[in-house]
Image (cartoon, grey):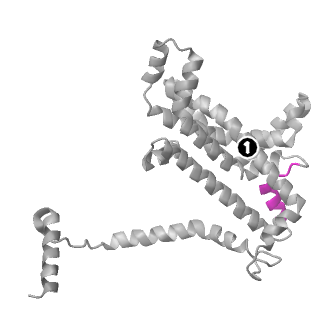
Amino acid sequence: MTVQTLTETLLQAQEREARPGGAPRRRARRSWSDVAFGVWGVLVMLFLFLPIIVIVIYSFNTGRLLVSWDGFGFDAFGTILAKPAIQSAVRVSLITALIAAVIATVLGTLAGIAMARHPGKWVWWFLGLLLLVSVTPEIVDAVALLPWMVFLGQDLGISVFNDGIVRLSVGSSLFATAVVSYIVRARLVGQDAHLEEASADLYAKPFTTFRRVTLALAMPAVLAGFLLAFTLSLDNTIVAAFVQVSGTTPWPVYVLSAVRSGLRPEIAAVSTIMLLLTLVALALVALVLKRAGDSATQIARTMTGG
């Protein structure tokens, strides 16, 4: 017996001893259904993300029109700095998304804490109203918001509702508020309420208990809700098209108007930047929840409001 043969025999013996029963492990054969579902999953992912990948690629097109590929370059990104209209539209969208996220976070956090810490029949009715806000078509919200904003701004004389930023922020915060409420409630439902009771037993004032205990427990979900509300408010196209006023055109509305004269590479360039901003926000959401000690399942549950 050669040294090589002896070495192979010893290695095989060690593998058999390390496995249950000492039997050599056989590679499980995948069934045809597993292969079919795997292929189907890849096709679904391509169907979902291939258009986004195409836009990202064409954002580096040096041609005059997006559909005409002339070469690879960064000319489209440079055009952003040369066109004040694009800069204004992006700035309006970012400011609007930030204000809408603040509004949604404040209202949604209070609603989520109330639903988690004061359960009752009213919670299911309130969840039903939030669900109604979530599933209502945006065109319905837009048609309802436009006369309401005009009534508040012109008929009642509340001049703040004549401002385009205010209109866009309020309109964008509707759906985002419901999302934040789901997330905060999902976070606190799994937390022990005895901590608040212990704080009260130690003669802490209600506001102190809320600030140092309840809000501290909900803070990862609050931050996650804020970032998600910010990303959701960036592309509220239909509502923005209805409630905007002259001089405060957001980015989605600018894109709709620009498409009529031909889709240009700078549109794809800004869209790529917006996509990266959204991905960064989602990554920060997962990072905040992970640092809070949540598992992958809990992170997914919190982000979906489950």
In the rendered image, residue 194, in percent from the top left (x then y), is placed at 42, 22
In the image, the segment drawn in magenta is: 248-258
Q: Is residue 132 visible?
A: no
Q: Is residue 74 left or right of residue 248?
A: left
**249 in the magenta segment:** yes
User: Dividing the image into 4 quarters, which one contains the N terminus?
Assistant: bottom left
Q: Is residue 98 left or right of residue 28?
A: right
The residue to which callout 1 is attached is 98
Q: Is residue 193 left or right of residue 269?
A: left
> Closer to the camera, 183 or 269?
269
> Closer to the camera, 4 or 71?
4
The structure residue drawn at horizontal position 60% and vertical position 40%, both measured from the top left corner, is 223
In the rendered image, residue 161, in percent from the top left (x then y), is placed at 85, 35
The structure residue drawn at horizontal position 66% and vertical position 60%, both measured from the top left corner, is 276
Residue 166, quarter of picture:
top right
> Closer to the camera, 274 or 48?
274
**132 in the magenta segment:** no
Q: Is residue 240 visible?
A: yes
Q: Is residue 25 above or below residue 256?
A: below
- Most frequent secondary structure within the magenta stretch: helix
Residue 144, quarter of picture:
top right
Residue extending furthest left? Answer: 1
